Amino acid sequence: MIEFYPQIRWVHILAVTLSGSLFALRGLGVLVGARWPQAPLVRYLSYSIDTVLLTAALMLVTILPAALFANHWLTVKLGLLVVYVVLGVLALRRGRSPALRAGCYGAALLVFLMIVGIARMHHPLGWLWPWFA
Ligand code: HEM
């Protein structure tokens, strides 16, 4: 399956971009009190994009050699993914006050950028890695 690595990586990155953009837009919608971010069509679109993202991610993990993950960047990435999901749920639905939802929205976007940095650098320190290297 290694011959499909570039295409699968491309699908993963495309899904990451769509997923992050949709979350950013939905979060903004929630902040201004709009109802469309919870509309069934928008939610199903989000579930579909995230399913593609995760499927491509799992395929990449299977294809790539285990040595690539030796410094545990993927473990840290998955830990931050859980944090991102919890913050995202609080930002879009569960946050009790507008202030809490806004705080969780900002924090979720920050964690998303940290995940991208870890993926790009192949290092748990992510974007900070060049300063410590
Ligand atoms: C919000 C969630 C995620 C984001 C923002 C994200 C982001 C990215 C990005 C930007 C890349 C490209 C890195 C590069 O340029 O080489 C990438 C690659 C990758 N991601 Fe993700 N990802 C996410 C979720 C996941 C999950 C859940 C897994 C594993 C189950 C995963 C596994 C991988 C793997 C194995 C690569 C390939 C690295 C390589 O080609 O060397 N990602 N990810």
Image (cartoon, grey):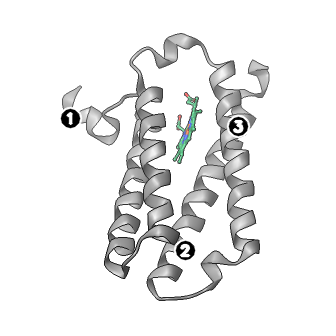
As drawn, the residue found furthest toward the left would be 132
Do we see residue 122 in this rendering?
A: no
Q: Which amino acid does label 3 sit on?
A: Ala
The image shows residue 128, relative to residue 61, as above or below, that is below
Observer-nearest of 117 and 103: 103
Q: In this view, does 40 lie to the left or right of 119?
A: right
Q: Residue at x 38, y 51 (%)?
A: 111
Q: How far apart are marks 2 and 3 (CA)?
A: 23 Å
Observer-nearest of 111 and 120: 111
Which quarter holds ligand 1? Answer: top right
Which residue is denoted by mark 2 in the rendering?
25
Instruction: Give percent across and percent down for residue 128.
Output: 26, 39
Q: Which amino acid does label 2 sit on?
A: Leu
Which residue is denoted by mark 1 in the rendering?
131
Q: Distance between the residues labelled 1 and 3?
A: 31 Å
Q: Which residue is drawn at 50% across and 52% down?
A: 85
Query: Mark 2 touching mark 3, by CB under 8 A?
Result: no
Mark 2: secondary structure: helix
Observer-nearest of 53 and 117: 53
Q: What residue type is labelled 1?
A: Trp
Which residue is denoted by mark 3 in the rendering?
56
